[in-house]
Amino acid sequence: MNVLHTIILGIVEGVTEFLPISSTAHLEITQQLLHITQSDFVKSFNIIIQLGAIFAVVILYLKKILSSYKYFINICIAFIPTGIIGFILYKIIKSFLLGNVYIASAMLILGGIVIILYERKQSNKLEVVSTKTIESLSIKELLILGCVQALAVVPGVSRSGAVIIGGRVLGLSNVVITEFSFLLAIPTMLAAVAYDILKSGLSFSKGEWGIITLGFIVSFVVAILLVKWLIKYIKTHSFEVFGWYRVIIGAIILIFFIR
């Protein structure tokens, strides 16, 4: 990986982390197109630079996090299933799932179909303004969201997409569950990065840490712009366009790599 590769990947991460289109899948596909070998360092790079995008959320939503003790506790409760599943499946995720472009492409398509079908089903219902909040969710509902988020250990599923659809099913509005998906990413990615560094990061060279730092900074800057845009977008739009994007890009990539 060189500096140009790192900047490109940082941009890809910043743009895709909070959209329901799977940042992991896009990073892996981009690396394949750039002919970057899926080494242990590259897999760790993919995990760690996501923290840059997450840091953007910390900056933008720090006041919200600190304003409600109940909200903070509910984030921690929802994180529990993801933390447990990620810890148990770490070796499988790192050795088999990460870097598998065929799995990522297939999951992009499958996830896209789920989003399209769900949004079309919702469009046929009478519009009801939801007043449900994250603070009002039960422990059972929070754990369900955590389990749904854990599906994103499979590249292509999309952590934010899974949480958003799960929250919508529980009766939360687009804006409320989208913001919660942002904030739930904080403990999730902090734990993932800390564990990955503990297992392999201490062996990185100074040059590799430099690449990681650059990717972190680029993803942070891009993510701040993306988050602000997304919140405005979902106030008047559904997520169906992202479903179609997933299906189309997943099919193109799958055909490309099969051929």
Image: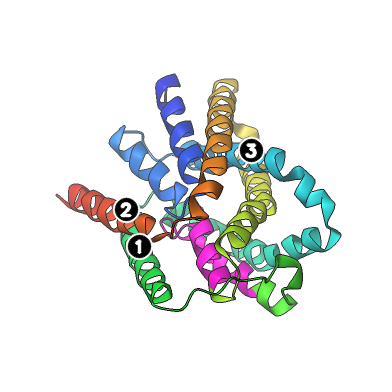
Is residue 180 shown above or below 78?
above
Instruction: Kindly state the secondary structure of the residue where label 1 is placed.
Output: helix
The residue shown at (38%, 55%) is: 242
Let me know if residue 215 appears in the view.
yes
The quarter of the rendered structure image containing the N terminus is top left
Q: Position of residue 16 (x, y in %)?
A: 46, 45
Q: Position of residue 226 (x, y in %)?
A: 52, 40
Amino acid type assigned to the residue bearing label 2 in the image: Tyr
Instruction: Kindly state the secondary structure of the residue where label 2 is placed.
Output: helix
Instruction: Kindly state the secondary structure of the residue where label 3 is placed.
Output: helix
Pointer 2 or 1: first along the chain: 1
Q: Nearer the viewer, residue 200 or 116?
A: 116
Pointer 2 or 3: first along the chain: 3
Circle 1 sits on which residue? 112
- Compute the Cα span from label 1 to label 3: 26 Å
Amino acid type assigned to the residue bearing label 3 in the image: Ala
Asked if labels 1 and 2 touch by Cβ distance under 8 angstroms, the answer is yes
The part of the image, by quadrant, that contains residue 214 is top right
> Residue 245, labelled with which disc?
2
* Region rendered in magenta: 144-168
Residue 160 included in the magenta stretch of the image: yes
Q: Position of residue 13 (x, y in %)?
A: 48, 39
Q: How many numbered circles are shown?
A: 3
- Compute the Cα span from label 2 to label 3: 25 Å
Circle 3 sits on which residue? 56
The part of the image, by quadrant, that contains residue 84 is bottom right
Residue 123 included in the magenta stretch of the image: no
Let me know if residue 105 appears in the view.
no
Q: Is residue 76 left or right of residue 171?
A: right
Pointer 1 or 3: first along the chain: 3
Q: Nearer the viewer, residue 61 or 124?
A: 124
